[in-house]
Image (cartoon, grey):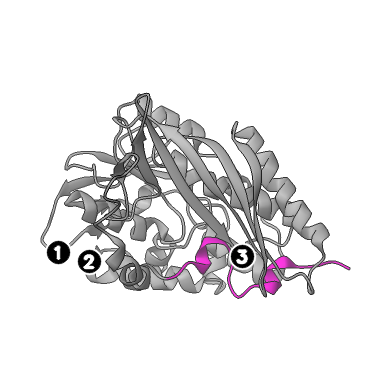
């Protein structure tokens, strides 16, 4: 029997995230405070919604911790495992670190789907971790009505060279290391079973080289583009940095077929929610179709850098804050 994993979940990939505005309300009370006698200095926490937490430890290192898991974004379990692992590792790369060890997070409808499919997802995750030089050891599983898979990842980095979303300053260019439109193609895949190799290639590509190049170039402000879309993550970066981000929509790359998928009506609900969230803070000088693509919920997207690295197109710049406007799209 052939199983279509995407049919066993209400959403797929990072498009099934809790909407950003709602999530900020949930975690609002968790900022500030902390242990009376901490075992390390907290460098990055919840305050600005960064990609991972970072703590200064001994030997001049920062320990970076993150976790990410989601429902199937593609039907093939091996590809799903690879995508989920690359996506989880990306949060460490987005902080300028190197992943060291990860553990599996598996939720499985044991009476609905055979465990052979879960094993394939775990195999995909293991292979991606191995390619990243990251140990994958153990993990946790629960019986769940929907299949979900991901990783909890621990990495290390230089505490003085971390990439953060609050370190942007006016005058810096904005670069993007992967094309957008993955959410549109994944929504089409879920509805039609069409396989989009170009989307799988993007989602399984690690952000390791981009992160290493950015740190070496002296870049200090970055985030990765996932479930909140380019506009959502850029809004958070600009808000945290006290600047306004100007986006040149014509310079933004898109995955082949993404615009066609949108025009055919394959738009994730998360992409629409992202656009609704940033709209009050945005001067939109583009049509609604382009705005939706820029807000498209990505899974295992690229790095958004306040700076330039070879091979990544410059898609805009940071300018002094313009009142309550964090984004200008033209």
Residue 62 spot, x, y in % from top left = 37, 34
Q: Which residue corresponds to mark 1?
A: 324
Residue 184 spot, x, y in % from top left = 54, 64
* Image quadrant where one finds the N terminus: bottom right
Residues at circles 2 and 1 in contact by the CB criterion of under 8 Å: yes
Instruction: Specify few, some or many for label 2: CA neighbours under 10 Å numbering under 14, 14-19, or 20 or more.
Output: some
Q: Which residue corresponds to mark 3?
A: 71
* Image quadrant where one finds the C terminus: bottom left
Mark closest to the chain's N terminus, 3 or 1: 3
Mark closest to the chain's N terminus, 2 or 1: 2
Under tag 2, what secondary structure?
Answer: helix
Extent of the magenta region: 1-18
User: Does residue 148 lie above or below 159 as drawn?
Assistant: below
Quarter occupied by residue 186: bottom right
Mark drawn on residue 281? 2
Q: As drawn, is 263 to the left or to the right of 233?
A: right
Residue 162 spot, x, y in % from top left = 33, 35
Residue 92 spot, x, y in % from top left = 46, 41
Is residue 16 shown in magenta?
A: yes
């Amino acid at each position: 029997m052939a199983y279509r994993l995407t049919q066993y979940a209400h959403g797929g990939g990072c498009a099934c995230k809790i909407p950003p505005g709602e999530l900020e309300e949930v975690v609002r009370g968790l900022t500030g405070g902390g242990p009376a006698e901490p075992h390390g200095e907290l460098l990055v926490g919840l305050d600005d919604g960064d990609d991972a937490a970072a703590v200064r430890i001994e030997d001049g290192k920062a320990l970076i911790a993150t976790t990410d898991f989601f429902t199937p974004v593609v039907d093939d379990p091996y590809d799903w495992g690879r995508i989920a692992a690359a996506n989880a590792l990306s949060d460490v790369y987005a902080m300028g670190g190197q992943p060291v060890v990860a553990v599996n997070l598996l939720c499985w409808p044991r009476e609905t789907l055979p465990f052979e499919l879960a094993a394939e997802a775990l195999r995909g995750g293991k292979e991606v971790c191995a390619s990243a030089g990251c140990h994958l050891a153990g993990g946790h599983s629960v019986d769940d009505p929907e299949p979900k898979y991901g990783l909890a990842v621990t990495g290390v980095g230089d505490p003085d060279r971390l990439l953060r979303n609050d370190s942007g300053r006016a005058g810096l260019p904005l670069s993007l290391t992967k094309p957008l439109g993955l959410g549109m193609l994944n929504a089409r895949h879920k509805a039609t079973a069409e396989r989009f190799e170009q989307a799988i290639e993007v989602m399984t590509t690690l952000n390791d080289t981009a992160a290493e190049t950015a740190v070496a170039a002296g870049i200090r402000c970055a985030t990765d583009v996932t479930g909140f879309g380019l506009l959502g993550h850029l809004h958070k970066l600009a808000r945290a940095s006290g600047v306004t981000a100007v986006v040149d929509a014509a310079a933004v790359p898109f995955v082949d077929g993404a615009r066609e998928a949108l025009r055919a009506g394959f738009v994730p609900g998360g992409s629409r929610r992202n656009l609704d969230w940033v709209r009050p803070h945005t001067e939109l000088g583009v049509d609604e179709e382009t705005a939706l693509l820029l807000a498209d919920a990505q899974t295992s997207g690229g790095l958004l850098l306040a700076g330039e690295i070879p091979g990544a197109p410059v898609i805009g710049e940071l300018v002094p804050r313009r009142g309550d406007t964090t984004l200008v799209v033209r």
